[in-house]
Image (cartoon, rainbow, N blue to C red):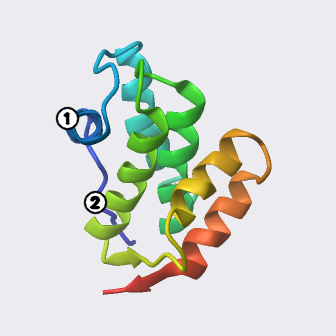
Amino acid sequence: MFEPSFLAYEHILFIHQQEIKIAGGEPSIRDKEGIKACVDAPKASFGGDYLNDIFGMAATYITSITTRHPFVDGNKRTALASCLTFLQLNGYQVEETHDLELADLVLDFVTKKISRDQVIDHLRRASIRR
């Protein structure tokens, strides 16, 4: 069985700190338990098998962090950076066809213009194996 490398609680916190340092915002955490839930969400399994493939797992970082909103600021940035970091750890690189394509993807999900399945499809199409 394929065993992906997942992000830990400390990784999500580090990513959030870096996003706040780069782009600004309030660095406070709103919900520590929510962050822990976001760390566990991509690992969902049943009967020893993961419920999602690698792209579904990656999308789960976006969907869980943006939905739970565990940080005061930087949730969307942290969600996207966590997704991309997870994919990179597992041998994939996501290529954008235009500037801010991935940021737009997250915004489209948050504003319900696209579904989780569409996020997964986009990540699958835009990813290349390294």
| As drawn, 76 above or below 106 | above
Q: Residue at x 54, y 80 (%)?
A: 97
Tag 2 residue: 5
Q: Residue at x 51, y 62 (%)?
A: 100
Tag 1 residue: 10
* Disc 1, SS: helix
Q: Residue at x 55, y 70 (%)?
A: 123
Q: Which residue is drawn at 37% across and 66% down?
A: 87
* Disc 2, SS: loop
How many numbered tags mark residues here? 2
Q: Which amino acid, by three-letter code, is at mark 2?
A: Ser
Q: Where is residue 89 in the image (x, y as percent from the top left)?
A: 26, 66
Q: Which amino acid, by three-letter code, is at mark 1?
A: Glu
Q: Where is residue 45 in the image (x, y as percent from the top left)?
A: 52, 49
- In the displayed structure image, the side of residue 4 where residue 99 appears, left or right: right
Pick the residue in front: 127 or 107: 107
Q: Where is residue 71 in the image (x, y as percent from the top left)?
A: 40, 22
Q: In which quarter of the image is the C terminus?
A: bottom left
Is residue 44 visible to us here? no
Q: In which quarter of the image is the N terminus?
A: bottom left
Mark 2 or 1, closer to the camera? 1
| As drawn, 97 above or below 38 | below
